[in-house]
Every structure is written in structure tokens, then in C-alpha cells.
Amino acid sequence: DQQVKQNSPSLSVQEGRISILNCDYTNSMFDYFLWYKKYPAEGPTFLISISSIKDKNEDGRFTVFLNKSAKHLSLHIVPSQPGDSAVYFCAASGRGGGATNKLIFGTGTLLAVQP
Amino acid sequence: DVKVTQSSRYLVKRTGEKVFLECVQDMDHENMFWYRQDPGLGLRLIYFSYDVKMKEKGDIPEGYSVSREKKERFSLILESASTNQTSMYLCASSFPLPTGGRGNQHFGDGTRLSIL
């Protein structure tokens, strides 16, 4: 059963506009959420995270919003740039995982930013 | 800067072979992970290790085993390779969780494994 879902396999956006990537989760024990970015032939790299005690976290052009009641988070990229074209994975971890930060990943969204 | 190095970028093996994928990290991380990435399925955890000689099954451990004899090295073993194990394999490492904190995982660049 997919506990972390990214329902949009792909997204195309014009350069300079906003990109919004969405992620839904089902497990209410998740209390920490991350976004990773992956270019072809490279490993995922950490982008931004948010704790469940917050509803927004911002880092430059990237903002993550968390709606706990809806079990939904989103990543906003403003303004979008062609170099942002990549696969974006959301991931979640929860309480009770012990010392390992085992992450549950979504299926990914391929973002294409058109010049 | 954290460096997670996977020994091969591309690997081609035959059905039934025993295959070893190696991963080394240079940040003294306690935790190490092996994932596979497949289209439409995202990253799925195969095995992880939280200390030398310690290992735990992830979500899809069948057909795989692991070895962690040294802290910096985590090996993934395909006991008898099959075509459905053709995939991108990703290794990651992280510090353990302190109380109230979170350790982000750092990934290698992956090994594209093809089983013929």
C-alpha cells in the first residue's frame, strides 16, 4: 500500500512561472517530510524539508507547504528555471522509527521547465 | 561535503549470476540504505543497516542480501540474479536520529544494473 503518493507523474511549466508539485500521505504517524530532486544518471539530492509542527518552510525559490488535516504537502518553485527540470520525490518519516531515519518515498513527478 | 560512492555506474550480468554492488561513504554515518528505483514505482527500500554487522529488511528484500563488515561500506548482494532485478540501484547514508532531530539521507549516483 502506497503510503506516500504523488499523483502527477509529470508537469510542464513555462520558465518564470510557478511550479507546484503535490504529495499526499496516508499515515498520520509521519511527522517529517522532505523533497528530493533527481537529475538523470545522478542520485537524489536533498532540497527542502518540513516538520509537522510547521505549515510552511521557505528556502530561496523553494517553499514547502504542509496541510496536516488534509495529509497533503506541496512544493512551490518560483520562478521556475530550466535547470529545475528533474524528477522530484517527496518522502516522509515518522515517530517510532528508532535511530534510523527510514524514509518512505513517493513515486516522483517529472518537472519540465520550458524556456 | 558528503561523498557516497557506488563502485559501478553501469553493470551487465547474466541470469543466475551472483552480483555484488558496493557502496562506500566518507562521513562516518551510522545508517546506510539500499534502494531500487523503477519507473512509476519511485524509490523502494531493499535493506538498511544502522551499525556494523547490523541489518534490517526494507520493503522488498526478496532475492537480496547485504553485508556491512565496516562502518563505511555497505554491500548489496543479488544471490542469483533474475531479469526482474534489472533496475537502478541507489545507496544512501545518514546519521542516526537524535531526539527531536532528523538526519537527511545522502545518496550515491546509482548503479544501472541490467540482467540478461
Image (tube, rainbow, N blue to C red):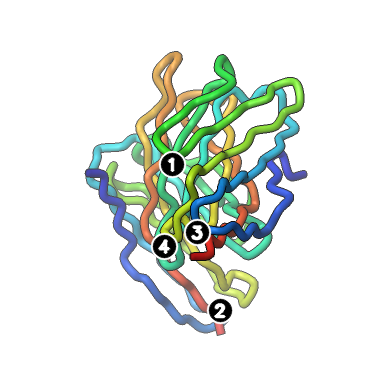
Q: Secondary structure at mark 2?
A: loop
The subunit carrying tag 2 is B
Query: In the rendered image, which residue does mark 4 sit on?
Result: B110
Give the CA distance from mark 1 to mark 2.
Answer: 39 Å
Are labels 4 and 3 assigned to the same chain? Answer: no
Relative image position of residue A79 (x, y in whole percent): 48, 46
> Relative to B96, is B83 above or below?
below
> Relative to B12, is A83 above or below?
above
Q: Are marks 4 and 2 in contact (CB under 8 Å)?
A: no
Query: In the rendered image, which residue does mark 1 sit on?
Result: A47
Q: Amino acid at mark 3?
A: Ala
Quadrant assignment, res B53: top left
Between disc 1 and disc 4, the foreground one is 1
Q: Amino acid at mark 4?
A: Gly
Are labels 1 and 4 assigned to the same chain? Answer: no
Q: Visible in this render: residue B78?
A: no
Q: Amino acid at mark 2?
A: Gly
